[in-house]
Image: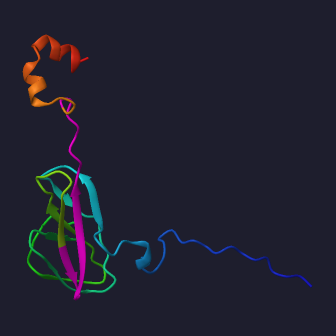
């Protein structure tokens, strides 16, 4: 008995006849958080792919954009199943300070938080004001500036 050879599937040059869907667990569904950011800087979240379509609204100090349009707004809107969004807010003007904003998608709130960097050390931290006042310029050059 002769068996026919098994042929590998033929991949057509135009690709698949359907649009592949992303599995929601492979894409972020919350804006997340950012740490160690610069002071008084606009910080943008990662792309967020909501698991459900529905209304989107943002809290005070927060704006969002849909699908990379470049148009940022704080006005409530609607997301469809294929949409993604990003949110942005301005970081604090103080060191090691957290700023948060809430985005609500289809009635579920998500928090985007941003924490500023630690204050950089100063080369004068090891000296008191009185010690610095009593030093001459040459002494400061020799002691502080190697």
The reply to whether residue 67 is visible in this rendering is: no
Which region is colored magenta?
Answer: 102-124
- Residue drawn 22% across the image and 40% down it: 120
Of 57 and 110, nearer the camera is 110
Res. 133 image quadrant? top left
Q: Position of residue 137 (x, y in %)?
A: 10, 14
Left or right of 125: which side holds 31?
A: right
Q: Residue furthest right?
A: 1
65 relative to 38, above or below? below
Q: Position of residue 72 (x, y in %)?
A: 12, 67
54 relative to 65, above or below? below
140 relative to 123, above or below? above
Q: Residue furthest top?
A: 138
Q: How many marks?
A: 0
Question: Does 49 lie within the magenta span?
Answer: no
Quadrant containing the C terminus in the rendered view: top left
Q: Position of residue 58 (x, y in %)?
A: 14, 77
Left or right of 55: which side holds 22?
A: right
- Residue drawn 22% across the image and 18% down it: 143
Left or right of 98: which side holds 81?
A: right
Res. 110 image quadrant? bottom left
134 relative to 88, above or below? above
The reply to whether residue 5 is visible in this rendering is: yes
Figure coloring: rainbow
Quadrant containing the N terminus in the rendered view: bottom right
Q: Position of residue 140 (x, y in %)?
A: 16, 17
- Residue drawn 14% across the image and 53% down it: 41
């Amino acid at each position: 008995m002769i068996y026919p050879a098994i042929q590998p599937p033929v991949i057509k040059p135009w690709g698949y006849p359907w649009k592949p869907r992303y599995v929601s667990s492979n894409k972020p569904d919350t804006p997340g958080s950012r740490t160690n950011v610069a002071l008084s800087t606009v910080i943008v979240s990662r792309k967020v792919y909501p698991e459900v379509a529905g209304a989107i609204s943002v809290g005070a100090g927060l704006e969002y954009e849909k699908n990379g349009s470049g148009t940022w707004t704080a006005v409530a809107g609607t997301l469809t199943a294929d949409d993604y969004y990003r949110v942005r807010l301005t970081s604090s003007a103080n060191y090691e300070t957290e700023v948060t904003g809430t985005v609500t998608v289809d009635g579920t709130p998500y928090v985007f938080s941003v924490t500023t960097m630690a204050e950089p050390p100063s080369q004068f931290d090891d000296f008191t004001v009185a010690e610095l006042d009593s030093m001459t310029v040459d002494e400061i050059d020799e002691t502080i500036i190697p």
